[in-house]
Amino acid sequence: MASAVKKFLQQTDLSGHELYPVATHGGKPDHVFTDMKALTGAAIHPGLTLPYGRKGNRLDSVEKVSQYVETISSQCLKGI
C-alpha cells in the first residue's frame, strides 16, 4: 500500500462507512484490502485490483472498472 494512502487511512475515521476499494499493483496485491480493513474499521467490500505496467491492459482495465462500478451501483440500489 502506498505510504500516502496508508497515512490517510490511519488519520481518517472511517468507522461506520462502507468502502469499495480499487487498487493498482505491479505484482501481488494479496493483503492490501485486509490491511485497509485493519486500518479503518470500515466495512470493506470486495475490491478491484488492476495490474499496471503490462502492454495492452488499458482497455481491459477500463472494462473492469466499468463492470465494478455497475456492480456497486446495483448493490447500492438494492438497499434503497
Image (tube, helix red, strand yellow):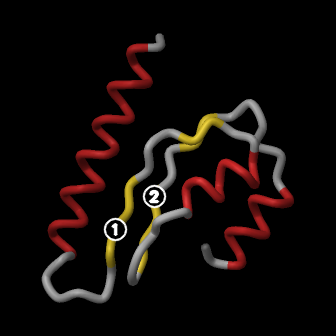
Measuring from the top left, give residue 29's x and y in whole percent. Answer: 45, 69
- Label drawn at residue 33: none
- Corner quadrant of residue 6: bottom right
Residue at the image position 24 percent from the left and 46 percent from the top: 67
For marks 1 and 2 on the same chain, the one whose residue lies earlier in the sequence: 2
Identity of the residue drawn at 15% across and 70% down:
59
Query: Is there CB contact under 8 Å for labels 1 and 2?
Result: yes
* Left or right: where 13 falls relative to 27: right
The residue nearer to you, when weighing 63 against 47, is 47
Q: Which mark is residue 22?
A: 2
Image side of residue 65 versus residue 42, left or right: left
Quarter of image, res 32: bottom right
SS category of the residue bearing label 1? strand
From the image, tell me which residue sits under label 1: 50
Disc 1 marks which amino acid? Leu
| Direction from residue 31 to residue 4 in the image, left or right | right
Locate residue 42: give its quadrant.
top right
Q: Secondary structure at mark 2?
A: strand
At label 2, the amino acid type is Val
**x and y percentages locating residue 31 in the rendered image:** 54, 63
- Mark 2 nearby-residue class (10 Å; few <14, some 14–19, many ≥20): some
- Residue 12: where, in percent of width, then height? 82, 53
Report the residue at 42% width, 76% height from top.
25
Quadrant (top left/top right/bottom left/bottom right) for the N terminus: bottom right
Query: In the figure, 31 relative to 45: above or below?
Result: below
Q: Residue at x 72, y 51 (%)?
A: 38
Compute the Cα span from label 1 to label 2. Answer: 8 Å
